[in-house]
């Protein structure tokens, strides 16, 4: 249930107070009558009413001054004030409105007119308060929405910056991996070239050392067979140690020969398959190109930018020394890189 509206009546005439209370008693208003202007000010400041009926002619302080003080106080400035007076001069009414009153009712009162004016200004007061609440609520919502938008914008900006940093990290990583791949490719090429230059000489050296070891082992066997049973054990131990050393050296030489042979096979594989010069990512890009994918398609599949795919394509053509795309695709299909 809504709280009854309160009307404060300030009039020094007891008969006027009694008349006004009788007019309002059958209504749903809460009526606060007082004959003292100072007491009226105190009541309004402590328990702000919804409307004030204020007499003009009062001792000690007239209604104009009471109204001015009420309008000067932040607690009571918005309370509507209807002046009551037997004065009906235009200047009196003008002064009442200049003091801050919202209406002027002449004595003697006409009950219907007085009630109509009271109801009108209470309705206006209620609408004013509702509008003020709505404005405050709207301001609060606007502030809240502005803060939400600002926070959303901050998060969006942070996400954009995070993605930019992520892409930069990916690009730097890609550059580092590509550089390492280039270094490994250069090292492999150097090893192949070195193997091509020194493989023949290494095989000849192996054969020469193997022959010397075989001869030394044969000589040891002859000496051991010629030793008498009562020969010194020290001599026998020296001969046995020498035999073991020769066997160990022979094993090491065999390992070296195997390594040379494996290197030769690896060299042949490198020569037979030029695609080994490409990195794993470059092979992926080339295979997708063979499948007919565009730069945009490849970029989406590999989570890179189209510009990065273009860089890969250019690097592949440079490595394989194939200037045009059709030739590159034909080369890849000939080397079994097609899907």
Image (cartoon, rainbow, N blue to C red):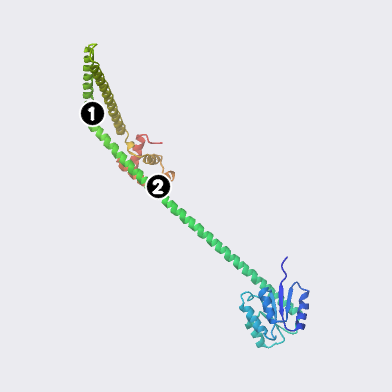
Provide residue 271's location: percent of width, then percent of height. 29, 33
175 left or right of 91 in image:
left
Residue 322, visible in the rendered structure: no
Badge 2: residue crowd in 10 Å (few <14, some 14–19, many ≥20): some
Q: What whole-number distance in Å separates the C-alpha atoms at marks 1 and 2?
A: 45 Å
User: Which comes sooner in the sequence, label 1 or label 2?
Assistant: 2
Quadrant location of residue 160? bottom left
What number of labels is visible?
A: 2
126 left or right of 298 in image:
right
The N terminus - image quarter: bottom right
Provide residue 99's location: percent of width, then percent of height. 63, 82
Q: In this rendering, is residue 337 above or below 129? A: above
Badge 1: residue crowd in 10 Å (few <14, some 14–19, many ≥20): some
Residue 225, visible in the rendered structure: yes
97 left or right of 206 in image:
right
Mark 1 lies on residue: 202
At x 22% / y 24%, what residue is drawn?
Answer: 209
247 left or right of 286 in image:
left
**18 or 281, which lies in front?**
18
* Element type where label 1 sits in the image: helix
**168 or 55, which lies in front?**
55
**51 or 268, which lies in front?**
51
Provide residue 4's location: percent of width, then percent of height. 73, 70
* Element type where label 2 sits in the image: helix
At x 51% / y 58%, what residue is drawn?
Answer: 151
Quadrant location of residue 297? top left
Q: Nearer the viewer, mark 1 or mark 2?
A: 1
Label drawn at residue 170: 2
């Amino acid at each position: 249930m809504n709280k009854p509206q309160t009307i404060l009546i300030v009039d020094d005439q007891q008969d006027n107070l009694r008349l006004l209370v009788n007019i309002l008693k059958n209504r749903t208003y809460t009526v606060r009558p007082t004959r003292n202007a100072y007491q009226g000010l105190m009541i309004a400041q402590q328990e702000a009413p919804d409307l004030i009926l204020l007499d003009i002619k009062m001792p000690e302080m007239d209604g104009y001054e009471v109204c001015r003080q009420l309008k000067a106080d932040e607690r009571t400035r918005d309370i509507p004030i209807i002046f009551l007076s037997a004065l009906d001069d235009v200047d009196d009414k003008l002064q009442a409105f200049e003091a801050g009153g919202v209406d002027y009712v002449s004595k003697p009162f006409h009950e219907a007119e007085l009630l109509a004016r009271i109801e009108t200004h209470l309705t206006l007061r209620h609408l004013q308060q509702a509008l003020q609440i709505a404005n405050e609520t709207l301001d609060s919502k606007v502030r809240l929405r502005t803060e939400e938008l600002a926070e959303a914008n901050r998060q969006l900006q942070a996400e954009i910056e995070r993605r930019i940093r992520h892409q930069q990290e990916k690009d730097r990583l890609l550059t580092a991996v590509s550089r390492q791949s280039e270094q490994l490719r250069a090292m492999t090429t150097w090893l192949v070239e070195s193997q091509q230059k020194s493989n023949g000489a290494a095989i000849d050296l192996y054969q020469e050392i193997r022959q010397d070891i075989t001869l030394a082992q044969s000589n040891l066997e002859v000496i051991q067979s010629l030793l008498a049973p009562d020969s010194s054990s020290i001599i026998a131990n020296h001969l046995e140690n020498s035999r073991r050393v020769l066997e160990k050296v022979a094993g090491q030489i065999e390992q070296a020969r195997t390594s040379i042979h494996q290197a030769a096979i690896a060299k042949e594989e490198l020569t037979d398959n030029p695609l080994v010069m490409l990195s794993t990512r470059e092979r992926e890009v080339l295979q997708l190109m063979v499948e007919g994918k565009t730069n945009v398609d490849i970029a989406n599949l590999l989570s890179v930018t189209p510009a990065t795919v273009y860089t890969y394509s250019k690097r592949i053509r440079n490595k394989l020394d194939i200037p045009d795309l059709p030739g590159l695709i034909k080369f890849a299909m000939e080397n079994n890189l097609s899907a």
